[in-house]
Amino acid sequence: MASYLKPGLHKFRSRFREYLQSCFGKRIPIIILAIHAEGSPAKKGRRMKYIKHISLILIVFLLIIGCSGNYANIKNLSESESKAIQQELLDNWSDYNISYDVRVIVFDPKNDEKKILVHSRWQTVKDQETWTQIVNGTIIVSPQWRAGEVWGDPIREIWVHNQFYGYVSHKKSAVVAAKIVDENTVFLNRQWGNLTADP
């Protein structure tokens, strides 16, 4: 790799490739990745600057057209709406299929045909004891779900084509995306800020 590339760029490019694969499958625009990675070995000045700018613009464009149609809309709520829903979820947790990992918690309503799938590594709330441990902080889930606390991480809604699927709350360091599987199912995964997604 050319010496002018900053340390860690190879790692970033590899993880960015994984992120693009989650959007495009195996049909990644390889030429864009190649340009972004290598550039032109003959000229390192102004030409490289233009190449980087063009490649980034193309990548953003491809992400927009490649991902927007295949992913659910994760909608932000106002602070008052978020707090009201948080309280409703605390009071009526048993009306939901609840999945969680250390950074994300998902509430999938039981009384509809919609499904929110998550990675097999995630845990599920199967009984009152587990939920009580989460609320009391015995099981560490961030964002915090302790009763009476002011939660800093808001609730967000998952929508597909004007159809409601459920709720998700997560730390700011975890970026979540819900990929459409079929007309009644989405798969929600967690991506860190460095674009590394759950497999």
Image (cartoon, rainbow, N blue to C red):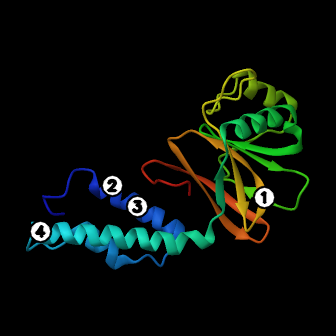
- Residue denoted by label 1: 164
Q: In front of the other: label 1 or label 3? A: 1
How much space separates mark 3 and mark 2, taking CA atoms? Answer: 9 Å
Q: Secondary structure at mark 4?
A: helix
Residue in view at x 50 percent, y 41 percent: 173
* Amino acid beneath label 2: Lys
Residue in view at x 69 percent, y 27 percent: 139
How much space separates mark 2 and mark 4, taking CA atoms? Answer: 25 Å
**Nearest the eye: 192 or 77:** 77
Q: Earlier in the sequence, mark 2 or mark 4?
A: 2
Q: Position of residue 14 (x, y in %)?
A: 37, 60
Give the total number of marks visible in the rendering. Answer: 4
How much space separates mark 3 and mark 4, taking CA atoms? Answer: 24 Å
On the question of residue 125 being in view, the answer is yes
Residue in view at x 8 percent, y 74 percent: 42
Residue in view at x 47 percent, y 62 percent: 19
Q: In front of the other: label 3 or label 2? A: 3
How much space separates mark 1 and mark 2, taking CA atoms? Answer: 37 Å
Q: Secondary structure at mark 3?
A: helix
On the question of residue 24 being in view, the answer is no
- Residue denoted by label 4: 46
The mark found on residue 16 in the picture is 3
Q: Earlier in the sequence, mark 1 or mark 4?
A: 4
Asked if residue 118 is positioned above or below residue 184 in the image, the reply reads above
**Nearest the eye: 137 or 111:** 111
- Residue denoted by label 2: 11
**Nearest the eye: 88 or 122:** 88
Q: Secondary structure at mark 2?
A: helix
Q: In front of the other: label 2 or label 4? A: 4
